[in-house]
Amino acid sequence: MYLQTKNKRKRISEILAIVAMILLLTYIADAAVAQGNKQGFLPMSAAQRGMIFGASTIVLFFVSFGIGFGEKAKITTVLLIAGGAIIGTSVLAASAMAKGGLASIQNSFVSVVVLGYIIMGLGILRAVQKK
């Protein structure tokens, strides 16, 4: 019974990390398409896109880590590291390319960058953690 519950936690953690990565990549692709246009391929504004896709991605990564805490799941570990790095770096790069560069970065963007790197750190922690 214990092994079955442990496998379910691992599986749920993996699924949540995969869904989070899919949402993150969809968000980034839509933002890239919207760069030259007013709107990307999703029928929503940049603020709506950030609230729905960005916030849910961050929450899903944290929930995935929490559910799979103490488990050794390579898929989840890699997705946490990659997802955190993508979140932090993409927001930082977008802020650097905006008018005014990094000097004009807003506090909300700084918090997203920090959260992205915290997610990456949790993935690294999971990778070096002994079973």
Image (cartoon, rainbow, N blue to C red):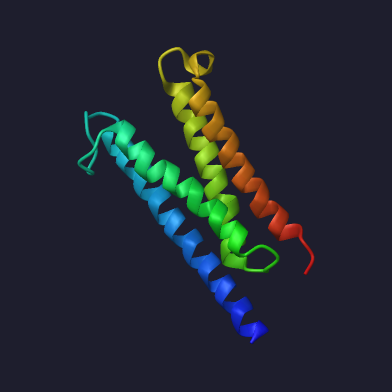
Residue 130 position within the rendered picture, expressed as x and y whole percent measured from the top left: 79, 65
Question: Residue pushed farthest right?
Answer: 130
Tell me where residue 42 sits by quadrant: top left
Is 86 or 115 nearer to us in this picture?
A: 115
Q: Which image quarter is the C terminus in?
A: bottom right
Q: Is residue 104 above or below residue 25?
A: above
Question: Residue pushed farthest front?
Answer: 1
Q: In the drawing, does residue 19 fall left or right of residue 43?
A: right
Q: How many marks?
A: 0
Q: Is residue 91 above or below residue 63?
A: above
Q: In the drawing, does residue 72 fall left or right of residue 110?
A: right
Residue 39 position within the rendered picture, expressed as x and y whole percent measured from the top left: 22, 34
Q: In this view, does 74 lie above or below 24?
A: below
Residue drawn at (70%, 59%) of the image: 127
Residue drawn at (64%, 87%) of the image: 1
Residue 83 position within the rendered picture, expressed as x and y whole percent measured from the top left: 52, 49
Q: In the drawing, does residue 1 fall left or right of residue 131?
A: left
Tell me where residue 76 sits by quadrant: bottom right
Residue drawn at (55%, 27%) of the image: 110
Is 59 or 21 nearer to us in this picture?
A: 59
Residue 53 position within the rendered picture, expressed as x and y whole percent measured from the top left: 37, 45
Residue drawn at (57%, 39%) of the image: 115
Q: Is residue 55 above or below residue 112?
A: below
